[in-house]
Image: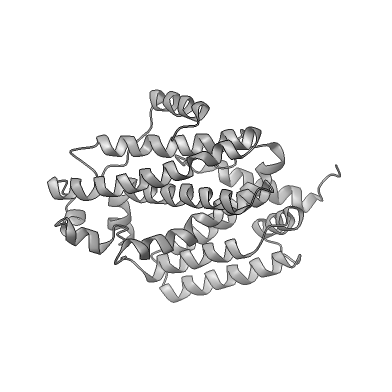
Amino acid sequence: MHPLPEAVERAYGQCLRQARSHYENFPVASRLLPPRLRRPVAAIYSFARRGDDLADEGGAPAEDRLRALDDLGRKLDAAAAGDPNEDATFIALAHAMAVHHLPAQPFHDLLQAFRRDITQKRYEDFADLESYCRCSANPVGRLLLHLCDRADPERIARSDAVCTALQLINFYQDLAQDFHELGRIYIPREEMRAFGVDEDHFRHRITDDAFRALMHHQFQRAGERLHQGAPLGGMLPGRIGLEIRLIIAAGGRVLTRLRRQETDLFSRPRLRGADYGVILLHALAGRA
């Protein structure tokens, strides 16, 4: 195996440091990943983090943020063509795309999700929200399958189910932050009306019977998606399979914690030591 050019090595190192510096309930570029995948996964994460940060910079005008995302798209196309600029993210990404034959479309889908974060704050029905998840979450799983050379239709379908479920769970644990800091509600309006919930519940953090019923409906659907995708962990080899099983089990544990927050569904659950033991046991058993 030939050593990487110095600029590429430095770029990957920067991406890895960035990935490990952010707290996430779901592991990113962890040491459980096969060593050959850690750097490309970190490059993917760095790209996604850049776009997400632009989408969430509420102080900047929307037009400026949209233009910045368009600029990321141009840099992505240049990286895909093997001609990155001096930006570490795109130096690493260009190398990962060339070596692992990663398609550009999932990255463009991510950019489309970030644009929607800027322009869309409400979702009328679940189909609308699910279309957002197809761009915001599912591309990451598909890219991972390409890295493993396992991007066949069955695994893609399982991966999409897992990624959509994890995205939904992430929405549910950040209800208050998304509303108060970003002005977003990721619960379909149609379902809010059906359960007798309005935006005052979010504004005043009201956890009453109507809101509990609404959220348990959301939790049930996310859990079903997670179980639909759970076999994916057994369809991937070795350490990457274990990594995926841990991610799925972690998502399931966060969902369990959310279900138990009967009096306050607006507080973000925190996983504790015992939870990580449950996650490990479930991962070893292949359960969500």
What x and y, as percent, mark residue 134?
47, 60
Q: Could you tell me which quadrant the C terminus lies in?
A: top left
Q: Identify the residue at the far front of this view.
A: 154
Lateral position of residue 265 relative to residue 48, left or right: left
Camera-side residue: 112 or 270? 112
| Colour scheme | one colour
Camera-side residue: 40 or 51? 40
Residue at 65 percent across and 33 percent down: it is 238
What x and y, as percent, mark residue 113?
47, 64
Residue at 84 percent across and 44 percent down: it is 3
Camera-side residue: 269 or 260? 260
Q: In this view, does 240 lie above or below 6?
A: above
Residue at 67 percent across and 49 percent down: it is 147
Asked if residue 199 shows in the view, the reply is no
Q: Could you tell me which quadrant the N terminus lies in?
A: top right
Residue at 42 percent across and 43 percent down: it is 226
State the count of labels.
0
Lateral position of residue 228 relative to residue 47, left or right: left
What x and y, as percent, mark residue 237?
65, 36
Q: Is residue 222 above or below residue 138?
A: above
What x and y, as percent, mark residue 63?
44, 76
Asked if residue 265 shows in the view, the reply is yes
The image quarter containing residue 202 is bottom left
Q: Identify the residue at the far right of this view.
A: 2
